[in-house]
Amino acid sequence: MTEAFRQLGTPRRGDIVCTADHASNHVPADINLGIPAHLLDEHIAIDIGTEAIAERLARDHVIPAHIAAVSRLVCDLNREEDAPGLVPEASDGHPIPGNIGADREGRLNRFHRPYHSALEQWLAAAEPALILSLHSFTPRLASRDEPRPWQVGVLYNRDDRAARIAIPLLAAEGLNVGDNLPYSGRDLNYTMNRHAEAEGRAYLGVELRQDLVQTPQDHARWAALLVDVAQRVASALP
């Protein structure tokens, strides 16, 4: 346990595991982002709903989870080390003044590198059949006027093995499914690029629309659906 992440459950070889890169809105006491407190409950600071769903996956469905414990505004764990947005100076039109001139190397050493080093070791020990990469997206961006009708998105970069199986399964549940939407895994996929694609591990990148993951009932429903889909995907993988 560190301030960068926490892990729930014990991985078993050949089973499914979950990662949640943006699950927390925690800002350490010694870091001042210089933003109104209410923004920490908004999508710019946290992937709303993912922490609760990851906890349910670990507690109720025996899918262990590697969960971020710091806000993406402090250090975005799903970005390359040299990515401009790793320590964002603005997000969806909101300036983050406390990040201007921030000690980038210090945040890499404190949060980013421990998160990924631990995840690397965790996955190597687990040898999972499938990684469920859990994110959520806002139904409306403040900085762009664009429709986001999808209820769930499935993201991937080069390896779409799991995605091709999962998309029709989710659509069969009556869901409006985004195929590499609301944004493309070819652009934003660092954690899975590093720990799945580079290692030949199958993964299912899932984005849930945040207005659908607000309540404990929502969390329970999505956790059960994702378990079912992930198990069927893992069984169908070549």
Image: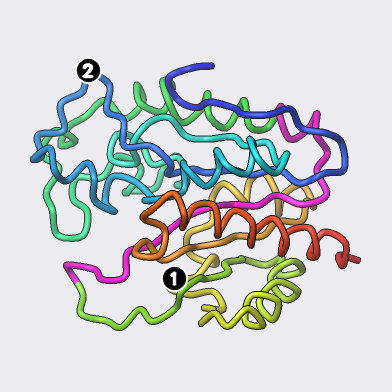
Instruction: Please name the residue shown 67% across and 67% down the image.
Output: 158
State the residue position of label 2. 29
**Distance CA(mark 1)–CA(mark 2):** 32 Å
**Quarter occupied by the C terminus:** bottom right
Amino acid at circle 2: Ala
**The image quarter in which residue 170 lies:** bottom right
Q: Residues within 10 Å of mark 2 (few under 14, many from 20)?
A: few
The x and y percentages for residue 58 are: 64, 37
**Quarter occupied by the N terminus:** top right
Any magenta on residue 37?
Answer: no
Q: Residues within 10 Å of mark 1 (few under 14, many from 20)?
A: some
- Secondary structure under tag 2 reads loop
Q: What is the span of residues highlighted in magenta in the rendered image?
A: 121-143
State the residue position of label 1. 183
Instruction: Please name the residue shown 63% across and 78% down the image.
Output: 173
The x and y percentages for residue 38 are: 13, 43
**The image quarter in which residue 98 lies:** top left
